[in-house]
Image (tube, rainbow, N blue to C red):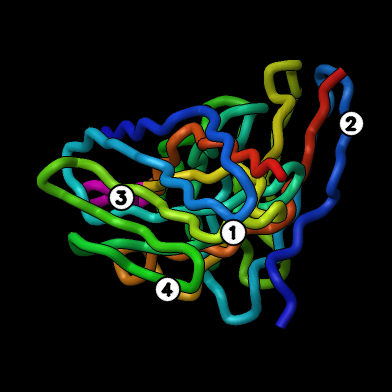
Amino acid sequence: NAGVMQNPRHLVRRRGQEARLRCSPMKGHSHVYWYRQLPEEGLKFMVYLQKENIIDESGMPKERFSAEFPKEGPSILRIQQVVRGDSAAYFCASSPRPPGTTYEQYFGPGTRLTVT
Amino acid sequence: GQSLEQPSEVTAVEGAIVQINCTYQTSGFYGLSWYQQHDGGAPTFLSYNGLDGLEETGRFSSFLSRSDSYGYLLLQELQMKDSASYFCAAPPSGAGSYQLTFGKGTKLSVIP
């Protein structure tokens, strides 16, 4: 059973460009979470999605950031008009059951975004 | 909201025992998880304590005291490969909240 897949692993964008980060959860997992991690910091929750639904996006900036988890295909985290402050590692995690029934999340290898 | 405090760095000798503490302040509390992350790697789930007491999984144990708002991760028979960052994390604190809140992490260095 393949783990959580993320691509690309490294992404370089110039200021003002768009960044698209992809996440394929583990097989059978329909709950996806996105986190951002700055160097020497913990992970900061951004958004929680189930198939085709955004359940909690309270950790995601209101502007420039969006997320989706379509019926078919990977979950996408989209950052429009990137700025230098968006440079970070973005991790996706998945779980087989919703929060409250499990607190174990399986993380992907992350996408390191660098904005130049 | 939730806030978790951990020491930023710990150094221990190979073969020894080390304890990484985590104190928390939350508006509601359901338990404490622990994750390990090697440099450049993905966080990996280690344990979850939903009730007070000690949970043991091989060389790793985790403890929770809800009355003291405190937990710890205990690593025994330290190996060089245990050098990593360790994060405590608290599950969502209220209805409609799904945020897993992480501490800033403790960087463990195991020395020969």
Please identify the quarter of the rendering in which residue A103 is found.
bottom left
Q: Which residue is mark 1?
A: B44
* Residue type beneath disc 2: Val
Query: Is label 4 in a helix, a strand or a loop?
Result: loop
Q: Name which residue lies at 55% across and 60% down.
A: B77
Quarter assignment of residue A69: bottom right
The residue type indicated by label 3 comes to Pro
**Where is residue A107 drawn, in percent x and y?**
62, 58
Q: Earlier in the sequence, mark 2 or mark 4?
A: 2
Q: What secondary structure is marked by label 2?
A: strand
Residue carrying label 4: A97
Whether pointer 1 and pointer 3 mark residues with C-beta atoms closer than 8 Å, the reply is: no
The crowd level at tag 1 (other Cα within 10 Å; few <14, some 14-19, many 20+) is some
Question: Does the CB distance between marks 2 and 1 fall below 8 Å?
Answer: no
The chain under label 3 reads B
Image quadrant in which the C terminus of chain B is located: top right
Circle 3 residue: B92
Q: Earlier in the sequence, mark 1 or mark 3?
A: 1
Measured Cα–Cα span from mark 3 to mark 2: 33 Å
Q: Position of residue B9 (x, y in %)?
A: 54, 30
Residue bearing the label numbered 2 = A12
Residue sitting farthest toward the left:
B67
Stretch in magenta: B90-98
